[in-house]
Amino acid sequence: METVATGCATNVCSEAAKGIFQEAKRHIRYVIIYKKNVEKFEEKRKTLIAKRTSVEQVVDVAKRNGEKIKDDVLDWHNRVDKVIIEAEKEVNALEVKAMSKCFSGLCPNLKSRYRLSRKAEEAVTTFDALINECRFQQVGYRDVPKPMVHTDFETFKSREKLFNDIMESLKVSAVSMIGVYGMPGVGKSSLVGEVQRQAQETKSFNSVVLVTVSESPEVFKIQAQIADQLCLNLEEKSTVGRAGRLWERLIQEKNVLIILDDLWKKLDLKEVGIPFGSQHKGCKILLTSRDKNVLSNGMGATNTSELGVLDDKEAWVFFKKMAGDCVERGDLRLTAIEVAKRCAGLPLAISTVARALQNKELFVWKDALRQLQRPYSEHPSGISAEVYKAIELSFNQLPNDPLKQIFLICSILRRDSVFKYLLRYVIGLGLIKGVHTLEEAQNSLLTMMNALKEACLLIHKDTNEKNWDVHDLTYIVAKSVASKDYQMFSLGMPDDQTEWLDGKSTKKCNQFWLLYPTINKLPEQLNCPQLTHFLLYSKDHSLTLPADFFKEATNLKVLDLSCMQFSSLPSSICLLTSLSTLCLDQGRLGDNITIIGGLKSLEILSLFRSDIKILPKEIGQLVKLKLLDVSWCGYLKTISAGVLSSLTRLEELYMGGTSIQWGQSSTASLIELNKLSRLSTLEVQIPDAKAAPHDFFEGLQKLGCYKIFIGEEWEWEWECFCNCQYSRTINLRLSTSISDLDRGIKKLLKKTEDLHLDELKGEKIALQELADEESLSSLKNLHIQNGLDIEYIINGENEFPQLQSLTLQSLPQLISFCPQHETGATSSLLLHELPLFSEKISFPRLKELWLKSINVTRVWHNQLSTTSFRTYDKLTTLKIEGCGSLKHVFSSSMAKCLVHLTDFEIIGCNCLKEIIFMEKIEENTEATMTLSLFPRLKSLELKDLQHLIGFCSDSQTQVIEFPAMNSLKIHNCSELEGFICRSSVEDISHISSQALFHNKVAFPSLEEISISYLRKLKMIWENPLPPNSFPKLREIYIEGLPNLNYIWKNDPKGNFSFKNLRHLFVGICWSLKNVFPVSVAKDLSQLSDLRIIWCGVEEIVSKVGEGSDSETTVTFNFDQLSSLVLWGLPNCKCFYPVRHITKWPMLEELEAFKCGKMKIFGTQLDSPPPLFLVEKVIPKLQRLALGDDYIAMINGGRFSSSLFQEIKAFRVQGDRGKSAYDFQISFLERFNNLELLCISNCEIKELLYTEGDTCSNGKNVRTLSTIRKIELSGLHNLKDCLWKQDVQVDHILPNLETLEIHNCENLVSLGSSSASFQNLTTLKVWNCSGMKYLDTCVAVQGLSQLKKLIIGECISVKEIVASEKNKAMCHIIFSRLESLELVNLPRLKSFCSGNHTFGFPCLQEVIVSGCPELGIFCKGVINAPLLQSVEYGRDKGLWDGDVNSTVQHLHSEKVGYQDTWYFVLSEFSKSIEIWKEKSLDFNNIKVLEVEECNSLEFIFSVSMALELVQLTDLKVKKCPMMKYIIKRGAEETTMDTVWLPKLGTIILESCSELTIFCMGNITLQCPFLKSIEVEDCPKMNAMASPREVGGGENTLFFNDKVQFPRLDCLIIVDIGNCRKIWHDNVTMGSFYELTFLRVRNCESLSNILPFGMVERLQKLETLQICECESVEQIIGPEDDHRLNSNELHEATSTVLIEFKSTNIKFVFPKIRKLKFRTLPKLKGFYSKLHTTEWPSLKQLKVRNCSMVETFAREYINFRETQGERQPLISVQQPLFWVTEREESFAEVLYNLEILQVMECSRLMDLVPTSVSFKHLTTLKVSKCHGFRNLVTFTTAKSMVQLKTMSVKDCQMIEEIIASTTDEVTDVIVFNQLESLELDSLPCLSRFCSGNYALVFPMLEEVIIGQCPKMEFFTMGELTTPMLHGLQSTKGKYAGRWEGDLNATIQNLLPKRSKAHIVFQYIANTVIVVVKVAILVYVYYKRQWKEQ
């Protein structure tokens, strides 16, 4: 065992030693052969590098071939790079170390050699492995190519929805094919390209392929494009084989998107090899085309969408991006905008044009604009070649030539044409084949138009399939193609071609389309043998057609000469034997149209709105005629007998709007219509249904379309006539019920779609005859109005299955739509409480509902089930107007059902408190949710709702949202305080903040808001608001909010934004202090129009809130603001009170007037800085309007005249008599480009000066050659005429074309005979009440170029051309006058009263309206050859052969006054006849003047008064027999209220018998009455009374029968019978708005104001009481048990007056002017002890109040007495009791500026010592003989503002300023006193006897007269530096000025002896002692009495 073990051990040791040796040997070898290993390393490295280079070369080749490199190749290459770099680095480092030696160089470095050798060997092994791997067959492969993605895709907001819809549809498995269509260049390819990009980025599809198909698709190429993008190699040569391979490849894709762009026709997907639908549900196909039919019909796409053009905003933004920043250049921007508009929203055109014009000069832009505006050449240069070619290709793809021609005609006619004309042209040209009737032709044309719309060559204009539009660029191409390829010559409004084409050009023409061209002359003949169509519309009435014009155009098929003026038709028309369509619409055709009868081929004849009077028998020869249109021929009375019955082929007959006399001798009868077997369409008006022949209506049953109006004087509204929505219309105006109608009419009614019923009489159930289901099944529109007896519409339960529109109007007795069951609702509800609609009535398709002037309290029942109410869920429009009993409209649950409502209006419903009633059941539901109301409501209008407090209440916690509303208008809702009113469970309480919008309402889509006349509203927006509130708001209109304090109360600071705001108007908001918070103002980059007018704002932008840095400069960038108006802001101090900068780069229009202290203009040197730096703003302005104060500043020479060069329109505004600056027209010389001048309310006395005159600035007026138009308004100082006699107007204004004069009340005529306007074309004079005539017969001859003359509302004009006395007969020619309008001239008697001859060679239009006294045009000869009618109303005219005969006819027939709104009644005038015959439309009267009517006892009955809905002004003067204004007749027993809704002014003057304004037991309501003036009506005693009242009765002028809630001004003069104005206890809700009260010469009044009336007078500003002999106090006693003023006066010394512990105080917070004159019995303001406060009083005048002994007295305090009763005293009553505190008493008259006291002989004292007069400017005292002095020292010292002092005729006054007993020297300074007058003061000894120093720094005038005792002015020191003379009377100086006032006065005294002087002194001393003794006696006597 040991041997074995030893052997084993030996073997093991031997093997171990052997291994150790081998290992050692290997390591030693590394050291020995290290050089060899290094060399081998280098060899292998080079080999590997060579391999790498070889691979790289192959890779480069592959890349150049578009191959993608394989991953293993890339990996090998990367590893090679890494290995080589790392190995080289390590080997090189070790090699350096191996070269070094150890032990001082004696021994090599073995260790380093070892490591080097080993590392080199390892590297070689790695290199070998990499070399062996480099055996690649291919380094690359062909991958699926990526699409060419354009990253410059433009995103437009208008296209976001379409794009998102496409992306979402691609995700829907059920949708396999999607189509997008649109016109060329609209951006379809860009859109689908972006779809491709996003689809690939999101990897929503495995593969995305986009192929452009184009107009000529080749399947082979399409397959190749798809294969390339799928990396599929199609080696097959046949199309079928390639399709199969492609099919197989696409099937392999899980999901793939294939986009086929630009399809022109159907593409067979199977032929291409594209699987779709069920074949491969993962394959989505997206198509684009210009033609919708290609997508839907050809390709079968069920999901198609149209891509439209860009809106204006997007187009401009895109245009700016393409063109660059150059478009923002000031001189270029306007032109660039116009160029952009001409691109018409087409992206391709925009990008092409913008890039072409980028960085070009202005002239290049203007030339491009010209080309775009007039692109009518064969090759339009204004459109890019790409766009032109694209549209032309679309046109060429149309399948046939007729369709192409129809497209060209549609393009030429464009959007403004009517389908019926298109149809008539197309039929005439024979473009519709294979039709036999007009109806078939119409259907065929509509089909063809639909094809053009689907091809995107025509545009859908609206939902009406008969309307169309053409894109601007399509129009350009169509015009070019029509001219080039179809010889269609066309001219339109923009063209300025004035000459006719040359002969060669016209000879080739096939069609002429001349739409209002500027051609001034036509050739004698049309040399156009191939001409088939000729259309000429002309506004030039001088353009005539020669007689032989059509001689060479005998092939003409269509002729349209609309709007032409013919004396007779051209004779060559008879040669047009091929003519098929003839239109002579809206023209003057002369008296004879028989020539038309010879046109035997005529199929269509239209004489619409022509002036024909008779349809002659020759028309009956047109046996081929299919259509005859004589509608709206207002003069057509006669159709010759047999004409209609001869037209046997007639299919359509239009006679609407005519007054044809049927069935008279030799005239047509209605029965002729029954003989027209082919008649399918009829429009006719029949005056009386009963007069129609028997069975006439039976013969009309075959009609497919009809409009039949039955009834006298039915007004055919133009809108109704043009409404083609309904094919069968009947309008009935009957004096009976429907049951009396002919059976034939009833049968027609059952088929009618559109039914109007007017004035049904004796009918309680309107549709009782039409109650069956058959009758109602066709009805689509039902309109019932003016049914005084109608209680129900239908009898019983029923459904209106087709009804879309329902109107119920003026049905005062209407109870409900249908009767309720007796045991049902009626049992629990009174009849007047029944809802209009119940569950019995169903309207499943109702879209429009209009309720007007009906008395229902509810529209729907509150508990109407949701299921029942859903019958109204289609409702889109709801209008409710004048329903005075309505309390609310519907509940919130009903509101939720109206999901389609888009328009909602409620007007004039006075009882309505809220629109939506929020049910209590909803309070706990959805507490935290948003309640969305009316999800599609776009427009809401709330108007004239006097009791509305809110749209609805927020009894829940939800935010109420109106998601789609874009327009909100709220007007005249006086109680409204918030849109959503907050309510409690018990009752509705108003919003505490009184904000219109708060955190409970949201309008995410609102764009326009208008808020006006909400008197309680204090705030618009209250922060915070709900999220997403008002983000789209663009327009804000705020007007007439008297209590509005804030628009935005708190600075939102980003919580909500108004970034999109474009327009802001704020007007008549006097409580408003600022407009914007600073954060809102800083974020108005889009604001373009800002108008702030007549407001109390102190700053435009409010200052920064607390804690902000006021030192930081704020910048306001108004980058888009082009118009700024700051008008009437008297309190404005600044734009922004903190340091700021404003920028206005785009400002073009500026209006500034009366802007307080805010500095508008200035320079950089001004402090404080102005709003505008003139050098930066004014040079850019185009329009400027300024107040005359700013003009005075500019005229001062501070600013250079060159700044105003660019202004084209300038307006100067005065301040209605307050202006100090007299504007001179020479100021305009600095405006070198001025075209329009407006001057308003200035103090101009002469408009122009003669050549020798100079203006106030010393300059002569030079020529103002650029001015084209002048408007003058409110120049009341222009008297008699505009200028002096010798003014050369033609020299100063040589190019004036238009002159308008308005409201110049003192202007009598224009000027004198020398005035000449050589270029004046338009003259308008309006509302010049003082004008008597326009000018003289000589002067008007200078108006040689006048084309239009308008004179209106000049109430004093009696003739237009004045005939001068002793003037010879003139021949006056208005050579160019075309239009003459005489409107509302109530006193006009003739155009000229002289016997002159007038020539009007061009006159074509004369309008005479509202001229009741015009009996003759003129006495002389009149020549007006072109005039064929005198118009006297809308579409109403008359012609009797000449002007005079026609005017006389109008006068005798009393017509032409129905539309009169200004009417004057006078005795022996035509107007009185018109009035008595009631031939006037009272609904139109706005102003009524009644003067000198001796025969009228009253003016209106109650029924007449109820028609005066427009009356604003009533003036009655000098009518001695007038007893009443309104009198209730015996038959008017049911009328208990007279409602005059717009009456604003009542003036009653000099009517000696007038007793009562409104007589009868009726209430007079005038909600807007502002002013009442009654003067010299001695017997008048009441405004309203049920009976006559005797003169001795105690009557009330105003009782509870009158309601004047807005009365502002009341003037009562010379009413002797009136004993009381108001009742002692006023209960009516009126007079709260009173600001002016004047009572004069009312001898029976004992007081003016009842005690209870005072609290209503919080707004009273002026109180004047004069010449009232019986007035003892101003305020009457509180009740009848207290002592009146007479009893108090009698008991003054013996009777004691008892006072309660409570005090009476009268406060008049707004009174500014107070005047008492000639009140001989007046003792005081109020007979009992009281106090008064007058915080605003500025002017006080007291005259001839002889009983007043004390002017004012401090209040006596009795509060410290014991017990319930106070002691009794005797009190001398003052005029004013004022408060007991002395300091407060001083403030009573603190604001007084003017004080006048005259003829108060008992007055002892002016004011107590404590009164301060710090603001007094004028003090006048006269004939007050009780005064000893005027004011005390203390009062005098306070008079620092006094400018004028006058003391006259005061017999006892001894000194002006009373001296005190203390001899203290003090100074009194009268800082502002300029004039002092002391006259007729016999006792005056001196101005002041005290030892005071008097200083008068401004005194310039002293008048002292008849003051014999005055020895010197003052005892103290006197300073008068500005005084240089003493006057005895005004302007007369006395004596020599001695340099001192005292010395001058003493020098003027007569010399007296020393004894005389001593005697005088003693006498004066005695008098003083006696006076003192008397005063002491009186004082102690009073003290004794008081004790």
Image (cartoon, grey):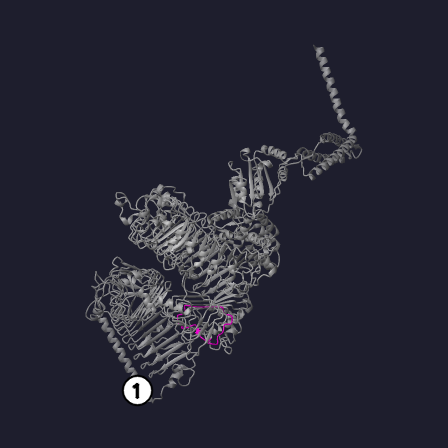
What kind of secondary structure does the magenta stretch mostly adopt?
A: loop
Residue annotated with mark 1: 1959
- In the image, is residue 1853 above or below residue 1625? below
Q: Position of residue 1039 (x, y in %)?
A: 41, 58
Q: Position of residue 1640 (x, y in %)?
A: 29, 71
Which residue lies at the image location 76% right of the left edge and 28% below the top edge? 30
Q: Would residue 389 appear left or right of 806 to someone viewing this image? A: right
Q: Quadrant of the C terminus?
A: bottom left
Give the residue type that dot 1 points to.
Phe
Q: Residue furthest left?
A: 1694
Residue 561, given in percent of the width and then of the height, sits at: 50, 59
The N terminus - image quarter: top right
Would you say residue 799 is visible in this rendering?
Answer: yes
Residue 1289: in magenta span: no
Give left or right: position of 656 versus 406. Answer: left
- Give the quarter of the image for residue 660: bottom left
Residue drawn at x 51%, y 60% is 573
Residue 1200 can be seen, yes or no: no
Give residue 871's position: percent from left, percent from top.
37, 43
Q: Residues within 10 Å of mark 1 (few under 14, many from 20)?
A: few
Front residue of 523 and 26: 523
Element carrying mark 1: helix
- Total marks drawn? 1
Outermost residue, top direction? 1
- Examine the image and state in which quarter residue 1986 appears: bottom left
Determine which quarter of the picture holds residue 1555. bottom left
Which segment did they paint magenta?
1313-1338
Give the answer, above or below, for where 662 lies relative to 1430. above
Tell me, yes or no, whether the highlighted magenta stretch contains residue 1324: yes
Q: Examine the rendered structure and indicate whether residue 672 appears above or below residue 1461.
A: above
